Image: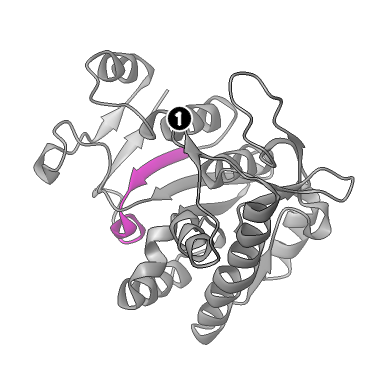
């Protein structure tokens, strides 16, 4: 029988409110069993970029990462934000270890090819070193992984945190019963934007297509849910999308099903 593993992805919004951050990490530390935390930090990185006179460029909802932006992203994600999470989790007696995809060769990627848009130093994942992660987890360590990968040739690559969480889940699904939880500012997928009472409790492949046709699901929610279905189709047990309250109750979320 496989051990249970919970993989939680949280966006950069969590760093904007210290009380909310502490509450989130307190609840994360109380998750029973094995766990991994994956985090982004795009908003914080953008703020630092502006202070340094580097104007963030976003095309089709995705960040363009030139050399200057990559430096800011690495310093922000792997440095400031990752170590802040790790130190706060240590205070909560959660033995966290902060990592990027380059550490221990955890997540390898290839630089995204140039088609309609040149996204610069952005990586598409090619391999997850699941055995190293399993060794860390079996040593009672809690990996805290930022949204950076590497290409095996010395190049760090900026990689979408939602995708990292999904690919980690898929890679570890043959070793654990994996639950994947995406935490955002919204309680889940809403039928009416801004109306929390219109939370859609369950979305499957069929209803997803209909919601896209009605434009209820659009923009950045599409790649997030595509990652959800990718995970489910490749062995992940359960996938939820919701606010940070999802750590307390899965009822306050949208569950994805095949």
Q: Which residue is pictured at 50% across the width and 49% down the height? A: 56
Count the marks: how many? 1
The quarter of the picture where residue 164 lies is: top right
Residue extending furthest toward the right: 153
Q: Which residue is pictured at 45% across the width and 65% down the height? A: 31
Q: In this view, does 131 lie to the left or right of 185?
A: right
- Toward the viewer: 147 or 121? 121
Q: Is residue 95 left or right of residue 244?
A: right
Residue 55 at x, y = what percent? 50, 52
How is this picture coloured?
Answer: one colour
Q: Which residue is pictured at 14% across the width and 43% down the height? A: 194
Q: In this view, does 172 lie above or below 258?
A: below
Residue 63 at x, y = what percent? 53, 42
Q: Is residue 42 covered in magenta?
A: no
How many neighbours does mark 1 have within 10 angstroms: few (below 14), some (14-19), or many (20 or more)?
few
- Toward the viewer: 90 or 17? 17
Q: Is residue 242 covered in magenta?
A: yes
Q: Give the range drawn in magenta.
A: 238-248
Q: Is mark 1 on a helix, strand or loop?
A: loop
Residue extending furthest toward the bottom: 91
Q: Mark 1 points at which residue?
A: 60
Image quarter (top left, top right, bottom left or bottom right) of the C terminus:
top left
Q: Is residue 190 left or right of residue 157?
A: left
């Amino acid at each position: 029988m496989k051990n249970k593993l919970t993989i939680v992805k949280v966006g950069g919004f969590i760093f904007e409110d210290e009380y909310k951050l502490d509450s989130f990490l307190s609840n994360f530390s109380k998750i029973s069993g094995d766990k991994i935390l994956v985090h982004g930090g795009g908003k914080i990185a953008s703020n630092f970029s502006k202070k340094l006179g580097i104007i963030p460029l976003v095309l089709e909802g995705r960040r363009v990462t030139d050399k200057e932006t990559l430096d800011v992203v690495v310093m922000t994600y792997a440095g400031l934000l990752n170590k802040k999470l790790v130190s706060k989790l240590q205070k909560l007696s959660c033995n966290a270890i902060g990592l990027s995809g380059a550490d221990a060769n955890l997540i390898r990627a290839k630089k995204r090819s140039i088609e309609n848009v040149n996204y610069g130093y952005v990586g598409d994942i090619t391999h997850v070193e699941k055995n190293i992660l399993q060794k860390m987890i079996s040593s009672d360590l809690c990996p805290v992984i930022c949204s950076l990968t590497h290409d095996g040739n010395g190049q760090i690559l900026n990689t979408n945190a939602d995708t990292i969480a999904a690919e980690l889940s898929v890679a570890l699904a043959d070793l654990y019963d994996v639950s994947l939880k995406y935490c955002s500012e919204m309680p889940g997928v809403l039928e009416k934007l801004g109306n929390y009472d219109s939370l859609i409790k369950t979305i499957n492949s069929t209803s997803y297509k209909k919601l896209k046709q009605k434009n209820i699901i659009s923009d950045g929610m599409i790649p997030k849910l595509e990652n959800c279905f990718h995970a489910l189709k490749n062995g992940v047990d359960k996938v939820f999308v919701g606010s940070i309250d999802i750590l307390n109750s899965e009822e306050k979320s949208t569950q994805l099903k095949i």
